[in-house]
Image (cartoon, helix red, strand yellow):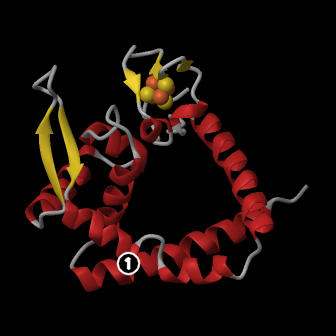
Amino acid sequence: MDNTLLYQLLERIGNLLRAEQRLVGNELGLQEVHLQVLFYLSHCNRYSNTPLGVSDYLNATKGTISQSLKVLEKKGYIVKEADANDRRVVHLILTTQGQKLLKQVVPPSLFAHAVKELSDEQVKSLTTQLSLLLSRLQKANRARSFGVCHTCRFFLREEDGFRCGLTQEALSHDDSFRICREHE
Ligand code: SF4
């Protein structure tokens, strides 16, 4: 089967969304990558909110991410916090200002308007099919899945809540819906 049309569609959608993101970023004095970093930090878990987690997720070099983090910190959108158990590890935390900014710009209005035109059933079906395609791409690329915690093979349901089988730490309900660098 010829997959060219599917590829063209995905590329066109990606281009339109990126153009919108660039426009919004320009108005705020931010680059596209800055908004991508903030969005990632808003839905990743505590094992993944590190500079390395950001570069892995965005497939960007450590240098690019390091520069972006400096800008975001200077503008007051993130703060850095040392890990309680390992002072060499730094966690990147969204500030209230960063959260407010994201609420204004994500998802981009172009996307929100277009999706409003679709039925719940259509959105559900698209989400399922695109998730499948993404997981195949990640597998082919041997990339980390960055999946949602409650779908991970290490996720444990216990009588009094949830636990990560990898770190043995307790997980909250909110944690269970966050994406994780260690997800398998
Ligand atoms: S259960 Fe999996 S996804 Fe969740 S925190 Fe542990 S390693 Fe990460």
Snapshot quadrant of residue 157: top right
Residue at coordinates 57% horizontally, 69% vertically from top-left? 14
**Secondary structure beneath label 1:** helix
Q: Position of residue 164 (x, y in %)?
A: 45, 20
Residue at coordinates 76% horizontally, 53% vertically from top-left? 129
Is residue 7 toward the left or the right of residue 165 in the image?
A: right
Q: Position of residue 74 (x, y in %)?
A: 8, 63
Up the image or down, 107 lies above or below 79; here it is: below
Q: Which residue is mark 1?
A: 22
Q: As rendered, which of 174 and 127 lies closer to the eye?
A: 174
Q: Position of residue 171 (x, y in %)?
A: 41, 28
Snapshot quadrant of residue 67: bottom left
Which amino acid type is marked by label 1? Arg
Q: As rendered, which of 45 and 132 lies closer to the eye?
A: 45
Q: Position of residue 103 (x, y in %)?
A: 37, 70
Up the image or down, 34 lies above or below 140; here it is: below
Snapshot quadrant of residue 25: bottom left
Up the image or down, 127 lies above or below 23; here it is: above
The quarter of the picture where the N terminus appears is: bottom right
Please identify the residue farthest to the front as the structure is shown: 160
